Image: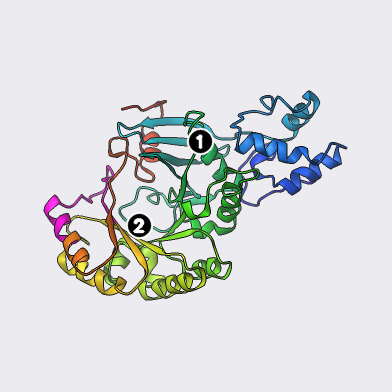
Amino acid sequence: MHLESNETSSTASKPSILDQSIVSLAAWLQDRSLPKYRAKQILGWVYQRRAESFEAMTDLPKGVRSELDAAFDFYRTKTIATQNSEDGTQKLLLQLPDGGRIECVLLRDGPRRSICVSSQVGCAMGCVFCASGLDGVERNLTRGEILEQMLKLQRLLPAEERLSHIVMMGMGEPLANLPRVLDALSVAKDSEIGLGISPRRITISTVGLPQSIDKLAEDKSPYHLAISLHAPNDTLRNQLVPVNKKIGIESILEAADRYFDATGRRLTFEYVLLKDLNDSQQCAEQLVKLLRGRTAMLNVIPYNPVPGLPYETPTAEVIHQFRRILMEAGINVMFRQRKGDDIQAACGQLRRLREKEPDLVELKR
């Protein structure tokens, strides 16, 4: 039997159809004396026609559908909580077969239909203000588990709407699970059998792992790269992003420059603004020195408070002053509007809330 597998696969009796490439699926069909061309037909149903079962693939012979159902799982995750925000943001908490839980988010902004997808169960980076890593990392997600989030979010849209943007900025560090992330994104951008999303509308977010950034550069990655900086100096970043002690801002920026030189893709730097920590005039001025002269966009995000953590959102006056310093220095900066504040849309919040309230089935606002 020609099936693709993954050493990080979760416990399940059958392989997932989402972990199968068109090559492995064609080989599986050939083993059963079935036409190889049906592989494209099957995956088209999975990714483009929003099927939720093999039985729904009505132009396949019933015998083929039965064989597929016997050999593969379709969806493996169970949606155990849903949150709907007044601004149109929707968040899902999914439970994996081995009991692990992950989050994914659909954001509506004008014509854009963006999704934020997880790459790991938990996170090992330890950012002190983020709920995702409070309990550490359990494991990497498989290609299929990453793709299943995309498909479940896609099904929240009416038939006439389609996903427009993907951001690998959910739970986990995407560059710590790079092979699976890239495998899933190759399907997401595939216009023939996949979701058909332009790689220019796909972003990989990272706290900054130079070796993996260099790998993306060597491969001439077609995706946007967003680096979560959060501090303008190592002393403060070591406090906010503990993994920085082993890396350092300088090596991250050098890797980012190599990525830009190799791909020509403009970099994005993310900066979560935390009251009385990294929101001072001095921090803004140091940030200017770091980024001046680089072809980059700076996204500043006022903090989305996490219950149980001591961090707060800066005042409007402080945010205005921070913005003024950056803009007057000519930094290409955007102050991002927070989405889903009323549904704990920040990474990891719903997962922790659900663990504290195990009888919760659905959350709506």
Question: Is residue 50 on the magenta stretch?
Answer: no
**Residue under label 2:** 127
Q: Which three-letter amino acid code belongs to the residue tagged 1?
A: Gln
Image height check: is 184 above or below 364?
Answer: below
Image height check: is 170 above or below 153?
Answer: below
Q: Which residues are magenta?
A: 300-322
Q: Nearer the viewer, residue 198 or 101?
A: 198
**Label 2 vs label 1, nearer the camera:** 1
Image height check: is 174 above or below 331?
Answer: above
Looking at marks 2 and 1 on the same chain, the residue that comes earlier in the sequence is marked by 2
Picture coordinates of residue 19 (x, y %)? 66, 45
Question: Does 26 sit left or right of 254 as displayed?
Answer: right
Question: Does 203 sit left or right of 186 as displayed?
Answer: left
Report the quarter where the C terminus lies: top left
| Alpha carbons under labels 2 and 1: distance apart | 29 Å
Which type of secondary structure does the marked residue at label 1 adopt? Answer: helix
User: How packed is label 1: few (under 14 Cα within 10 Å), some, or many (20 or more)?
Assistant: many
Q: In percent of the image, x 29 and y 73: which residue is there? A: 292
Rendered image: mark on residue 154: 1
